[in-house]
Amino acid sequence: MTTEKKVRTRFAPSPTGHLHIGNARTAVMNWIVARHHGGEFILRVEDTDRERSTRESEESILRDLAWLGLKWDEGPDRGGPHGPYRQSERLDLYRDRMSDLARSGRVYPCYCAPDELEARRQERLARGESPAYDGHCRELADAKRRAYESEGRVPAMRFRVEPGETRFHDLIKGPIGFANETIGDFVLSRGDGMPMYNFACVADDHDMEITHVIRGNDHVSNTPRQVLLYLALGWTPPAFAHIPMILGGDRERLSKRHGATSVDQYRAAGYLPEALVNFLSLLSWSSESGDEILGMERLVREFDFGRVSESPAVFNTEKLDWMNGQYLRALDPGRFCELALPFFGAAGAPAADIRKVTDLLQSAVDRLSQVPEKAAVFFAETVVPENAEAEAILRSPEARRIGEAFLGQTAPLVSWNSELFLAVMKEIQKGTGIKGKNLWMPIRVMLTGQVHGPELPKTAEILGREKCRRFVRESLERSGDG
RNA sequence: GGCGCGUUCGUCUAGAGGCCUAGGACGCCGGCCUCUCACGUCGGCAACACGGGUUCGAAUCCCGUACGCGCUACCA
């Protein structure tokens, strides 16, 4: 590699749904490689499957990509020198390439109907033969061809795969080879003229000057077909890198039944894009430093194909949660508050002291969506013991003495904060002789109804003197009747 | 069935012939901190799929087996 070509990578999703976590990881890798080399990251929409492609999906994918922080240099929304970036808008280009191939005799029309194809394939399988296309239409006589045409059959175009072996070098897996016999003459374009994946992909990657094709491992067996196409068109294939699949807990390809599988679901659940990108990067890659909380800059700087693993990785939500918690805690408190606010829903967060609440909660959650539920205790108008343990604490003889002392101590107070609350607790301890857990737990339950929670002085401060006194009074009244 | 790829603690991984009585991280268990929980911190449990080679020496190289995943579409 003496001629320094600018590195160009691409992410080429088909807009048939939300951005899947596995595809997101592919996008992350491509983005990282491009940035690592100071190159360009291109976004291309592969919408040649008219049945399944929708504009809504495309928009949603672009939105999620942007949310992840993976900025693209060229794409359908912003154009670029190699556009258009939607395959459905590049049909003329594919037609030209097809003509090139036709001129050199590398393609031929195939009139086989889908059911005929399937039937013959099953027969070959039953006989223990290769399921690849049998070459039925390979050497069709003109007469036969005309006969099919008059039947109204519209041909697909197949690529003629000659005997031999197709090898390529994978940046991650090393040399890989396929016997051409196992490939078979594959379809380049359908009867309706739409190009197939392998054909459009090669034409576009070449036109867009892609230098590194980085994609999932499920594409390795497509690669020899694509290499054959590059060669037939007189082009030099790009470098290929096939990254391991992401699996679910049962070691099967990650799918819906494994729970959340799309990026938008993780956004809604309160994960930070930086955490998700970091986590995804660490699936099948590791920093030489051994560090795991890396951040985008280090991810880009330290990336190295040599450190990409060759085996599939299980997507482990527990570790993602931990990592997200790390990112959440590293956030500036003001920023944390700002990011948590939307999770209170349309009604918004209760305005009073929300910042004090989020400050207290920053180390208590690992997803932003947990903030509202954990914050509820600060905005409640009544206190209900959460369980039998809480009720038992309220029934204890100490609880009444502590509660009464609390009311007595707080009655004359004109101001209120965590320090004053602490002072009150000290006085109660002095007056009743009760201390430690036996002193604090009854107050905690009287104020929050819960046996666990953030530090009590801060909690009491946020609640305010009046509310604290009311909750204690109501608690005493309730247990007084029993 | 064929072809391809893969196989280190439950999970993510380090490891590129001796540095490995296999290291780190998550989770789990326990200690500390502490009114509780969480955070933080300290410690513990836990793995080289199996069988043959090659070598003075193999988690690392070779072969085979098993298992897993992927592809085998006029889907991408």
Image (tube, coloured by chain):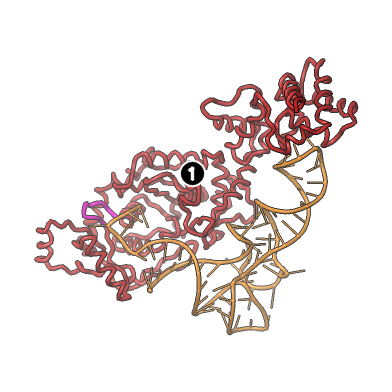
A229, A141: nearer the viewer: A141
A204, A124: nearer the viewer: A124
Q: Is residue A325 left or right of residue A421?
A: left
Q: In the rendered image, which residue does mark 1 sit on?
A: A263
Measuring from the top left, give residue A58's x and y in whole percent.
38, 41
Measuring from the top left, give residue A70's x and y in whole percent.
49, 43
Query: Total label count?
Result: 1
Amino acid at circle 1 = Val
Q: Is residue A398 left or right of residue A383?
A: right
Provide the major secondary structure of the magenta segment: loop
Residue A328, picture quadrant = top right
Q: Secondary structure at mark 1?
A: helix
Q: Which chain is red?
A: A
Q: Give, as a single range, the part of the protein colored magenta.
A: A189-196
Is disc 1 surrounded by few (<14), some (14 to 19) or many (20+) residues within 10 Å? Answer: many
Q: Which chain letter goes with mark 1?
A: A
